[in-house]
Amino acid sequence: MQQSDAGLDRAVLVLEDGRHFAGRTYGATGRTVGEIVFNTGMTGYQETLTDPSYHRQIVVMTAPHIGNTGVNDEDPESGRIWVAGFVVRDPARRPSNWRSRRSLDEELTTQHVVGIAGIDTRALTRHLRDRGVMRAGIYSSDALTSADGAAFTLEELQTDVLASPAMAGAALAAEVSVAEAYLIEPIGEHRATVAAIDLGIKSMTPHRMAERGIRVHVLPAASTIEDVLAVGADGVFFSNGPGDPGAATHEVELLREVLDRRIPFFGICYGHQILGRALGYDTYKLVYGHRGINQPVLDRTTGKVEVTAHNHGFAVDAPPTGESLAPHGEGRYGRVVVSHVCLNDDVVEGLACLDLPAFSVQYHPEAAAGPHDAAYLFDRFLDLMLGAPSERAGGDA
């Protein structure tokens, strides 16, 4: 592979199946590898970049113009950018927004996020829809040549991509979870206390609960049932997060301890998948997943169609219609129904337990970024806690 006249501005994206796209550097230069996925949101790139669920993933933005509003200090969903790499077609030459503090290019460079711009993201997205998400690598600057200055061939870069870890079987929640517990106080009158297990939680999620008078103890992914009971939890929440739910052994066992005690439970995204596995259902990897803020979901409880925010590559394999008996423990957790379905492909988007105070959805109701159609789910969780006393031990409830 020969260097072009662009020199250090040259970058290349290489997929594990051998397809490649030549472009120019965007953000930091160097090498990065990960699972490549596409996000269909027209806006919200700052929330996307800082969503811990994108850990070890290279994100392709399908919207052609990215970076127009720059980067501000109010919208991040965590303390850092989590994506492994960033792919855009036409980055803004300069940001234009009164809240902007710096350009997106500058932010990516500062946080050492390797990106590529100027490629045909439409062709790339169509390829991923046809072939499925896969591993990929972005290479620029010194990463295009060996130590002796010889240019790497595309075959050599593809070999490097194939040597990177796959997402299937990856247990990643501990890598993005908070190291120490922290507290979000309720806004206004205290009405309930929640133990939120941080599997990759976004900052807006506990804020949405605090708005409803909920005191939120955000706990590390490695927390035990004793940690949950110690804060006097009226309810337990499992957040979104990265990785394969099939590898989440600890999280599944913790949730079963919660369900055994009949403590009200609400899970979103990864937390939804953990509920599915705790109940005894399988999970499976989607061909290209759902990522964006424009996914239509039917709430079977109300018949309402919601436009929702998604970021997931795995799904729960549960009977799509009617009641089913939770497979784990020979009926130990009673009857379950699929409460929500995706109208694009009929993927299970929600579970509701009929004999336990527990429910979950596959999407992100906190609206960061995203529409507010699903905000009612936090109200539903609060109602569940106020109407179902739980086993508690100590704490500040």
Image (cartoon, rainbow, N blue to C red):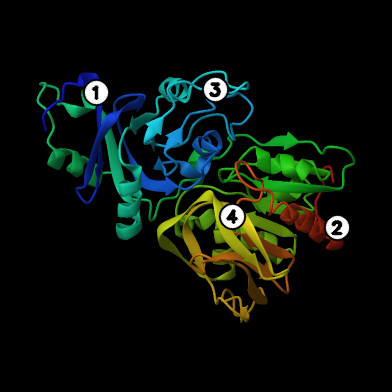
Callout 4, which amino acid?
Answer: Tyr
**Label 1 vs 2, first from the N-terminus:** 1
Callout 1, which amino acid?
Answer: Ser
Q: Which residue is mark 1?
A: 141
Q: Is residue 255 above or below residue 182?
A: below
| Percent position of residue 55, x then y | 45, 41
Residue 101 falls left or right of residue 130: right
Callout 2, which amino acid?
Answer: Leu
Q: Mark 4: few, some, or many residues within 10 Å (few <14, many ≥20)?
A: many
Mark 4 against mark 3, which lies toward the viewer? 3
Q: Which residue is mark 3?
A: 96
Mark 3 against mark 1, which lies toward the viewer? 3
In-front residue for pair 43/78: 43
Alpha carbon separation for disc pair 4 and 3: 31 Å
Q: Residue 363, labelled with which disc?
A: 4
Q: Mark 1: few, some, or many residues within 10 Å (few <14, many ≥20)?
A: some
Q: Which residue is mark 2?
A: 386
| Percent position of residue 107, x then y | 47, 23
Q: Quadrant of residue 147?
A: top left
